Image (spheres, rainbow, N blue to C red):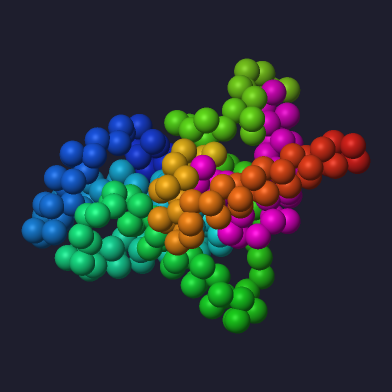
Amino acid sequence: MKRTEKDQQLDVKKPEDKGYVRELVQKSKAGDKQAYRELVERYQTRAFRIAYDILQSQEDAEDVVQESFVKAYLSLKHFQEKSAFYTWFYRIVYNMSIDHKRKRSRRGGVALEFDESYLNTEGADSSYLYEPVQTPDDMLKRKEQAQDISKVLNTISDEHRTVMMLREIDGLSYDRIAEVVGVSKGTVMSRLHYARKKLQEGLKDLKMAS
């Protein structure tokens, strides 16, 4: 699944119209492939971010997202719509990413270097991560900040890092995050607090060391 710039912008440009998404889900259940294609376009960027955050590999993340969409399509008849489609689907992506990482570890896979370009913050309140880019100096500063952030994020567990990404980058509520990762709301809040604290401490340490 080769991603283009258009692909990376599709779902963040579309408002979350619950009624329309429900209609797409119903059509997809009835076998409308075009409707499911629209669901893919709507959620593929955020799904990719979840997978990439866990796997740290573009190729692996793309494979997992593609497999997740196939699995979701084949499982649509079991989706009872008690939760939002994106919550149900992101849980599939999350679980498949964790499973893929475990299999890769057993094969002796090597962790790849984090690529800060995948921290697409458009549409989410993540201003504490980046300053607006206006000049070449600002662009360099942003790149250095992203590299520092990636260094710190890679020192915390997948569970803590994923919760922070879902909250700060994707803007999901505590309840939605809890559904995605399969833990209580209180656990989500605890992990988020820990991740934010570690990020702040890590960035402070890096600044003092520079």
Check the image and name the residue furthest to the right.
209
Horizontal and vertical percent position of residue 193:
64, 45
Q: Is residue 190 magenta?
A: no
Q: Is residue 117 left or right of residue 31?
A: right
Identified at 36% across, 66% down, the residue is: 67
Q: Main secondary structure of the magenta part?
A: helix
| Residue 40 visible within the image | no
Q: In this rendering, is residue 102 above or below 84?
A: below
Identified at 61% across, 50% down, the residue is: 190
Q: Is residue 80 left or right of residue 95?
A: left
Check the image and name the residue furthest to the front.
186
Horizontal and vertical percent position of residue 107:
60, 81
Horizontal and vertical percent position of residue 103:
54, 78
In the rendered image, which quarter is residue 57 located in?
bottom right
Q: Quadrant of the N terminus?
A: bottom left
Count of labels in the image: 0
Identified at 17% across, 65% down, the residue is: 77
Q: Is residue 157 magenta?
A: yes
Check the image and name the residue furthest to the left.
30
Check the image and name the residue furthest to the bottom.
106
Horizontal and vertical percent position of residue 83:
29, 52
| Residue 165 visible within the image | yes
Q: Quadrant of the C terminus?
A: top right
In the rendered image, which quarter is residue 90 located in?
bottom left
Identified at 34% across, 38% down, the residue is: 10
Range of magenta residues: 138-167
